Image (spheres, helix red, strand yellow):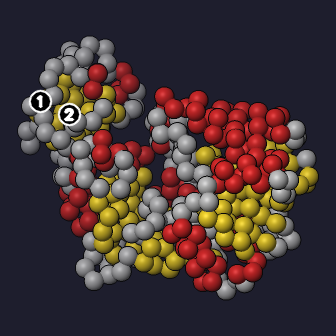
C-alpha cells in the first residue's frame, strides 16, 4: 500500500525515536495542504530516514500520531484487531474475573485516539482523533468479534474532537438496546445512564481507590464533594459511615446519586443531597465552623492546558484548605486530581501549603494512582494523570 510522505524539520526526530508518539505542527517541514484529516502516511527525518507510520491531521496542533514503527506494516482492520486483542488480553491475564475495565487506553496501547471501556456486555467506545474516526466501523466490528453479543455505545464528546475538526457523538450503536445498565463495583450497584454520564459512564480508574474507605468509614460523618453519581459516598456508607453528604452542582448527577442510594437499599435519611457549587459551599461550610470526620475531594480536571497550571493550583489549594479546616482531629482527607499537567510533587506541595494555611498537620498515609487497565506507557507521561492522596489529619 502506498502512503504519502510526511517530512520532519532537521533534528526533530529524536523524541519520536526515543519512544514518544506525537509530532506537533511546528516540527513538520513543508506544507500540510496535500494531506486530509486522518490520512495514513509515513514519517521521515529531514535526511530521508524512515521514522514511523501513522496518521496526520492538518487541523490539529498534534499533527501526526504514531501507529507503527515497522515500514512494512499495513494499517488496516487486521492491524487494529491484533492491537485491540493484545490490549484486552493484557487486562484479562491480570484479573480474569473482572468484566469492568478499560479495554483500550489510547496511546498506552499504541492505539492513539481510541478508548474502549468494558462494563460486562456493554462497551463504551470513545474516538478522539480524525485518524481513528476513519476506522470507526472496523473498531465496532472488532469489539463484537472479540466479545460476541457486545452492546456498543459511541460516546465521543471530548473537546479533543473539536480540535480535530470532528463532531461530537453520543449514541447507542447496537440496535434495540438501551443506553442504561446496572453495574456492580466492589459489592455496590450503580445504575449508569451512558448517554447522560460523564466521560465513559463510570470512573473505573478509581474503583480500587474507593477501598481506602474500608477501614476508616465506620461510624464517621463523611462529605463527598464533587460527588458525581455518588461512588465515594456510597462506598463510605457501605463500609459503615454514619452519615454521608453528597455535594454536586449537577441536578442530573444528584438525581443519579439518589437513585443509587435506593438501588443499594440504603436509608435515604442517612444521606444529605446538596446540589450546589462545591467550591462555594466548601468555603461557606468551613467559615461556618461545620465539621466532618472524612472529606473526599474528587473534582473534575481543573487544568486542561499547561498555560492554566498556576490558576489550577490556586483552585486545588482552595478546596483542600477548606476541607482541612472542616476535618475533625483524627479524621481523614482523600484528595484527588485527574489533571495530567499537575504532577504528583506539585499536587502534594499544593496540599502541604493548604495545610499550613489551615493550621493543620497532615500525614500522608497512602498515595494511589490509576490502576492496571489505565497503565502508563513510558516515556509518554501524558497517559499518567490520576493522583489520589490519603491523609490523616491531626
Residue 231 position in % (x across, y down): 62, 67
Instruction: Report whether residue 117 is seen.
Output: yes
Residue bearing the label numbered 1: 33
Taking the spot 87% from the left edge, 38% from the top edge, the residue there is 359
Q: Which mark is residue 141?
A: none
Camera-side residue: 126 or 318? Answer: 318
Q: Quadrant of residue 137?
A: bottom left
Taking the spot 20% from the left edge, 15% from the top edge, the residue there is 47
Mark count = 2
Q: Is residue 296 above or below residue 378?
A: below
Q: Check contact, mark 2 vs mark 1: CB within 8 A.
A: yes
Residue 17 position in % (x across, y down): 35, 26
Q: Is residue 58 above or below residue 375?
A: above
Residue bearing the label numbered 2: 58
Taking the spot 25% from the left edge, 16% from the top edge, the residue there is 9
Instruction: Report whether residue 239 is seen.
Output: no
Callout 1 secondary element: loop
Q: Residues within 10 Å of mark 2 (few under 14, many from 20)?
A: many
Camera-side residue: 163 or 130? Answer: 163
Q: CA distance from mark 2 to mark 1?
A: 7 Å
Asked whether, in this view, residue 160 is left or right of residue 259, the answer is left
Q: Earlier in the sequence, mark 2 or mark 1?
A: 1
Asked whether, in this view, residue 344 is left or right of residue 241, the answer is left
Residue 25 position in % (x across, y down): 27, 26
Q: Quadrant of residue 149?
A: bottom left
Q: Quadrant of the N terminus?
A: top left
Callout 2 secondary element: loop
Q: Residues within 10 Å of mark 1 (few under 14, many from 20)?
A: few
Residue 338 position in % (x across, y down): 56, 47
Asked whether, in this view, residue 381 is left or right of residue 146, the answer is right
Taking the spot 84% from the left edge, 43% from the top edge, the residue there is 363
Amino acid at each position: 500500500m502506498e502512503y504519502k510522505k510526511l517530512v520532519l524539520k532537521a533534528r526533530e526526530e529524536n523524541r519520536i525515536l526515543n519512544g514518544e508518539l506525537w509530532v506537533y505542527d511546528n516540527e513538520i517541514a513543508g506544507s500540510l495542504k496535500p494531506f486530509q484529516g486522518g490520512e495514513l502516511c509515513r514519517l521521515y527525518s529531514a535526511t530521508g530516514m524512515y521514522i514511523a507510520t501513522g496518521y496526520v491531521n492538518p487541523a490539529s496542533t498534534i499533527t501526526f500520531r504514531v501507529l507503527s514503527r515497522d515500514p512494512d506494516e499495513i494499517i488496516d482492520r487486521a492491524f487494529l484487531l491484533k492491537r485491540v486483542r493484545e490490549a484486552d488480553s493484557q487486562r484479562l491475564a491480570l484479573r480474569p474475573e473482572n468484566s469492568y475495565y478499560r479495554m483500550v487506553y489510547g496511546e498506552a496501547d499504541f492505539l492513539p485516539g481510541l478508548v474502549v471501556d468494558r462494563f460486562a456486555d456493554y462497551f463504551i467506545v470513545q474516538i478522539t482523533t480524525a485518524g481513528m474516526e476513519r476506522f470507526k466501523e472496523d473498531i465496532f466490528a472488532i469489539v463484537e468479534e472479540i466479545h460476541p453479543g457486545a452492546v456498543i455505545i459511541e460516546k465521543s464528546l471530548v473537546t479533543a474532537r473539536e480540535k480535530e475538526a470532528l463532531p461530537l457523538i453520543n449514541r447507542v450503536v447496537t440496535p434495540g438496546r438501551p443506553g442504561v445498565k446496572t453495574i456492580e463495583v466492589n459489592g455496590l450497584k450503580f445504575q449508569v445512564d451512558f448517554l447522560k454520564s460523564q466521560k465513559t459512564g463510570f470512573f473505573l480508574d478509581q474503583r480500587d481507590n474507593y477501598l481506602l474507605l474500608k477501614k476508616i468509614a465506620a461510624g464517621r460523618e463523611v462529605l463527598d464533594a464533587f460527588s458525581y453519581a455518588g461512588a465515594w459516598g456510597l462506598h463510605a456508607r457501605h463500609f459503615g459511615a454514619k452519615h454521608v453528604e453528597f455535594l454536586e452542582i449537577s441536578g442530573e448527577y444528584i438525581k443519579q446519586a439518589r437513585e443509587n442510594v435506593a438501588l443499594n437499599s440504603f436509608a435515604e435519611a442517612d444521606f444529605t443531597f446538596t446540589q450546589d457549587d462545591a467550591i462555594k459551599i466548601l468555603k461557606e461550610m468551613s467559615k461556618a465552623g461545620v465539621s466532618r470526620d472524612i472529606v473526599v475531594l474528587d473534582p473534575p480536571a481543573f487544568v486542561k492546558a499547561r498555560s492554566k497550571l498556576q490558576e489550577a493550583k490556586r483552585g486545588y489549594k482552595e478546596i483542600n484548605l477548606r476541607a482541612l479546616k472542616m476535618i475533625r482531629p483524627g479524621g481523614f482527607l482523600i484528595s484527588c486530581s485527574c489533571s495530567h499537567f499537575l504532577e504528583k510533587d506539585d499536587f502534594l506541595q499544593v496540599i502541604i501549603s493548604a495545610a499550613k494555611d489551615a493550621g493543620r498537620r497532615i500525614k500522608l498515609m497512602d498515595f494511589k494512582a490509576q490502576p492496571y487497565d489505565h497503565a502508563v506507557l513510558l516515556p509518554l507521561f501524558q497517559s499518567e494523570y490520576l493522583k489520589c492522596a490519603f491523609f490523616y489529619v491531626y
